[in-house]
Image (tube, helix red, strand yellow):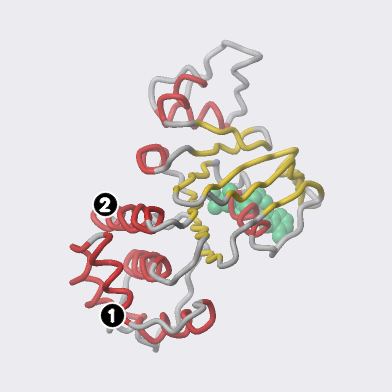
Amino acid sequence: MSILQADCIDFRYPEKPLFSQASLQVCSGSMTGLLGPNGAGKTTFFDILCGLKKPDNGQITNPFTQQLYLSQTLMTPPALRMYDIFKMTALLCSPAPINKCHIQEKLARWSPRILDRYNEIWSKKSSLCSYGEKRWFFTVSLLSIAADFYILDEPTAGVDPEFRFHIWQCLRGAAQDGAAILVSSHNVDEISENCQGFYMISQQKFLHFEDGEAFKYHYQASTLDQAFIKAACGADMHKSSQPIRP
Ligand SMILES: Nc1ncnc2c1ncn2[C@@H]1O[C@H](COP(=O)(O)OP(=O)(O)OP(=O)(O)O)[C@@H](O)[C@H]1O
């Protein structure tokens, strides 16, 4: 098993410290979640992992050789069709030529009921696609490009429940095929249901939880959202047993 290891990462913007001695692991063949309130630093951390930003201190050991990063915002040239945009993306980031049959073969294994809609969006002009359609189309297309490490920044944001389901099916399929997946979301339910463990950014650290129950237990919360709010407020359950009421 290959493991990406981020050790004791410190990072600050001039006006804002984000990480202090923050550590995290991502293993091949599994999905790891990253949760954190708005502005906690999820995107910044992904940028650090991809070498787009340098940490002030700490070390990243990354054994993966082919990594793909789906950023939070998608901008597509309105005049182009979705397949043209995907082909340009694949030219830039796929180690081998990739065609539609190749993508369909993977989607048929991972989440077959997505295929009809995928084919429909494939030939649609980008200007005629909704944001949610673009989001799920590029997420599942990216997963069909061969890589050993996928980083996805809020892939399900703005996507309806049916296509959120397909996205998670495809993520699960890619992990079962051996990839390491690191995925962020604000939806604690979907992260805890789908990931094999997750990290919550709290007090500039990455706190690891095996599952949603452990998360609720740690924050003495009755719901996952309540646990999230307590973590976001920086409740330190080792120092205080005072519950923070959302
Ligand atoms: N280049 C920059 N210079 C200064 N501050 C920045 C810069 N980029 C981001 N920030 C600030 O750093 C903080 C973390 O931003 P980041 O986008 O990493 O958070 P996030 O956890 O991904 O947020 P969200 O959940 O809203 O997407 C924010 O307060 C943001 O305003």
- For the residue pair 166 and 174, the one nearer the viewer reads as 174
Kind of residue indicated by mark 2: Pro
Callout 2: SS: helix
Real-space Cα separation, disc 2 to disc 1, in angstroms: 26 Å
Residue 161, label in figure: 2
**Horizontally, is 172 left or right of 41 in the view?**
left
Which residue reaches farthest top?
241
Mark 2 C-beta closer than 8 Å to ligand 1: no
Q: Position of residue 198 (x, y in %)?
A: 50, 39
Q: Position of residue 120 (x, y in %)?
A: 22, 77
Residue 169, label in figure: none
For discs 2 and 1, the disc positioned in front in the rendered view: 1
Q: Which residue is mark 1?
A: 101
- For the residue pair 130 and 154, the one nearer the viewer reads as 154
The answer to which image quadrant residue 54 occupies is bottom right
Q: Position of residue 197 (x, y in %)?
A: 47, 37
